[in-house]
Image (cartoon, helix red, strand yellow):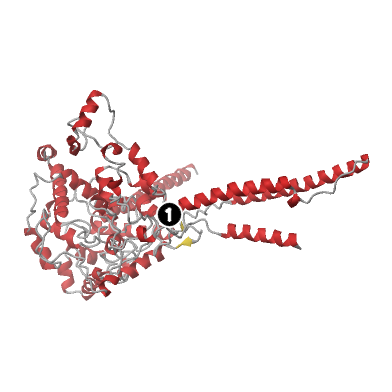
Amino acid sequence: MIHKHVFAKRFLILLISFLSVSFSLFAQDIAAGKALFMGKCASCHNVLKDGTGPALKGLEERHKWADHKELQAWINNPAAYMAKDPYTQGLKAKYGSMMTAFSEITLPDVDNIVAYINDAAIVKAVAPGAGTAEPEGDQNAVIFGIISLVLGVIALILMQVNSNLKRLSDEKDGLKTPAPIPFFRNKTNIALISIVFFVFGGYMVAKGAIGMGRQKEYQPEQPIYYSHKVHAGINQINCMYCHGNVWESKHAAIPSTNVCMNCHKAINAYEKGPKLYDEEGKEINGTAEIAKLYKYAGFDPNNPNQWDPSMAKPIEWVKIHNLPDHVYFNHAQHVRVGNVQCQSCHGEITDMHEVKQVADLSMGWCINCHRETKVNFNYDSTGGNKFYSLYEKFHDDLKSGKMDSVKVKDIGGLECQKCHY
Amino acid sequence: MKRLLIFSGMLATTLGWMGCSEVRRDPGTVYMPDMNYSRAYETYASTEALKQAGVNYTATPVSGTIAQGEAPAYPYRNDSAGYAMSAGVKNPLDPTTVDLKEAERLYLVNCGICHGKKLDGNGPLWNDGNGPYPSKPIALVGDEKYEAMAAGTMFHSLTYGKNAMGSYASQLSTKQRWMVITYIKNQQGAKAAPAAETAAKPM
């Protein structure tokens, strides 16, 4: 009896250890396969999507790849394998290039890589559907509105009740009250209302007149819902990747379609970012917006190798920040020489899905910044812009303590002709 | 009756006001349009009207010309023969006089997004497979194949694009592209011999 019990226990231990060993072996397969895949395959192959080479999901069901020896022969020497194999010849015709040879790949390596591919294909298929955050509606404003409306009505009723009660008590005391004057005939009321109208109306007129020709808050609808938050914020693409001309020209370049296609040739679906909504609260389908780009670019995602970039049509983006023709503004002067950050004038672009104008771009706004901003003056021989060594008087004044810093206004930042000529 | 009319009028105004979207989709009007909108051709304005008036606007420089201070044009075409010959093209820039700080800036702006700050092929768009980019960018430092690759071949790929990568000829001038190549080669060399980096620094 005891003997049997011990035997069962030993068997159990043996079983558990066997299971754990086999499990850890299996796990290592995937880990080793992942390392190999990332190092050698991932530049051209994705598990789920076609890239430079085909998607590798379910590759064992295709051709003879269930036999890993065949697969190894193909990976080790694609040119030799292809010579007598029409299937891989077809692949070359479809994808436009032949696979690089990886002669160092062994049969266990192939097993590991396939194990990783099968694992990644399953895990990825479950993943979507995460991150369903609802947009926060501004319900507070509505609630406050209703409350103040109710309070206003109550106040009116109470005032009415109060005057009625007063009249009743007056009548009881035998006092004669003059006939009540209607609200809108009361001279005090008329005077008060007209003063309020005058002040309020005057304020609105002045505000409107100043605001005319200025475009603060302007947020036009663009031909494609392009989110700066997704590109420059979440994915950390440098502003100058697309707007490189700020470095050398008056204008910040609007990227041509081929610049978009640098990434979107491969990124053909919006999957990993947060849900997108436009300013009206309507949900945006990111993948459909990328499809719009493909239309402009003349790109067929099912046939990427046939793409001819020269047939692309320009996307007519709507310009948001407009200056009147009689103002000169130069991006290179501000960004490259002045070290001004894009965000100083354009606001927190990395948080904006649809870009809007944050600064009012009025003259007062420009001048104010010119008054306060210090230039990159060469206070000593080691730092600053060497150009300012011309300014001998400032160097002398700085030495004698007459000046503590050189600002844009000191080098002509308030001169009319700097911007108007 | 009159009161009802006034009340309903006020209600309609309020509702109309509230119905307006707070998003400003309209740029508004200006005081003096002839001072505000340029009569001369502005950047990104359509050239269609000019064409109809018989004015032809040339968008590209005359073929065969090189801007002052630019590097000589790359001689080969975008085909497999050109790719094979590209290894023979020498970098026209003297690596000791290249402004490596500017070259680094160009690399970080244009290449770092995929190939990574450390040139290890792990930029924010890949991010160990968690980024949106579906294929892994190559490691410029740490992969023997690319450390051994000729500068001319790299230049060929940078000019015309290669595999998933697009052409950067529209974002970087010929000289800038060679500057980026110089920077990459410099970083690859720096990794092989860390002492050489300080010695190679210009100025």
Q: Report whether residue A393 is seen.
A: yes
Q: Quadrant of residue A355?
A: bottom left
Q: Position of residue A405 (x, y in %)?
A: 28, 31
Q: Report whether residue A140 is seen.
A: no
Q: Position of residue A391 (x, y in %)?
A: 20, 35
Q: Tell me what residue is drawn at x 50 percent, y 44 percent.
A: A1
Residue B142 against residue A302 in the figure, above or below: above
Near-viewer residue (A121 or B1): B1
Q: Secondary structure at mark 1?
A: loop
Left or right of A70 on screen, residue A164: right
Left or right of A175 on screen, residue A154: left
Q: Position of residue B31 (x, y in %)?
A: 42, 57
Q: Tell me what residue is drawn at x 25 percent, y 49 percent.
A: A332
Disc 1 target residue: A215
Q: Tell me what residue is drawn at x 70 percent, y 49 percent.
A: A190
Q: Position of residue A310 (x, y in %)?
A: 24, 69
- Chain identity of mark 1: A
- Amino acid type, callout 1: Gln
Label count reads 1
Near-viewer residue (A213 or B141): A213
Question: Dot 1 surroundings within 10 Å: few (below 14), some, or many (20 or more)?
Answer: many
Residue A218 against residue A367 in the figure, above or below: below
